[in-house]
Image (spheres, rainbow, N blue to C red):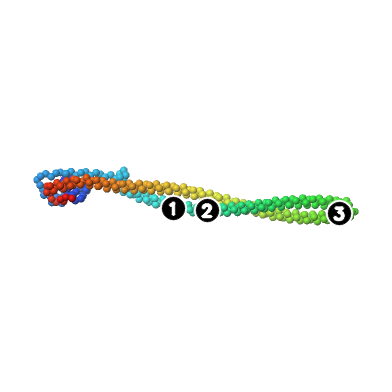
Amino acid sequence: MVLENCAICFNYWTSHGNYTAGYNLLIRDQHIPEAHASVVPRPQPQPQLQPQPQPQLQPYNQGIPIATLQTQYNNAHVRIRLLESQLNDANSRNGSLQAQLNSINSQISNLQSQLAASNGRANDLQNQLDAANSRNSSLQAQLNSANSTISNLQSQLAAANARPNGLQNQLDAANLKNSSLQTQLNNANAQNSSLQSQLAAANARANDLQKQLDDCKKEKKDLEDEVAKLKSDNATLVSENKRLNDELKKKDADTQKYYADKIDAENRIQTKLEPYIQALKDFMNMNNITGYPAGP
């Protein structure tokens, strides 16, 4: 190792602002021509200076190379951007579903109002039908009473044909009253049939509204389930995004710490080399060795 033990080459290399690390990488079986070109040989022996071994820098973060850290850093950025895109899509979908849910709630409220109105109308018709049935029963009772009176008068008429025409007049009056009551009964039956038709139509309408209401409630339940799933997925994406951000911050801190440690190590090496360089320069000046700077 001729070059490694050559003080002239070593002094020439370090006096020109170079580090020992670079000196160790030179070809070991050749001298530096410029270093020996200006040196006048002297009979006295030259001190053999051994270069100080340079401490080997170890990358920070348990020996992970900075290129690997940078790749992981970039991959984390890409993953975060992807998660942010998915999060935005989920928020957009959530907003759309919320709008649909609000519309369904409005439809349900409207159908409930219609159903309440229809039920109220059905109750009114039922009350009218009950009143008509009550009137019908009353008229039927009056008709039965009139028929009984007519039968009684007819019996009296048959038993007393010789009697004056007063009984016939009573019979005619009873027949007239019977005809009037029959007309009222027919009208009541017709009104009863009309009310029953209206009640059936109201019940059919109420059943249709109830079916629509049930369908809307089912659709609302499906939308609420989908919204709950989206919220769960959204929470998962937010958690993953936070984890990757924390990991990215840690890798960024590791990278900065690596560079800081590297610069600190280089500065400490330079500081340790400065006394040796200065001592070598002083030695060369004392011995009138030319070709090197006389001092800093």
Horizontal side of residue 215 vs 251, given as left or right: right
Label 2 SS: helix
The one of 267 and 94 positioned closer to us in this rendering: 267
Q: Mark 1: give few (<14), some (14-19) or many (20+) Cα within 10 Å.
A: few
Q: Residue at x 78, y 51 (%)?
A: 142
Q: Residue at x 87, y 55 (%)?
A: 166
Horizontal side of residue 5 vs 124, given as left or right: left
Spatial separation of the CA atoms under disc 2 and disc 3: 79 Å
List the residue tagged with mark 2: 102
Q: Mark 3: give few (<14), some (14-19) or many (20+) Cα within 10 Å.
A: some
Q: As shown in the figure, which amino acid type bears the numbered disc 1?
A: Asn
Q: Earlier in the sequence, mark 2 or mark 3?
A: 2
List the residue tagged with mark 1: 88
Please provide percent x and percent y for residue 18.
Answer: 21, 49
Please provide percent x and percent y for residue 220.
Answer: 53, 50
List the residue tagged with mark 3: 167
Spatial separation of the CA atoms under disc 3 and disc 1: 100 Å
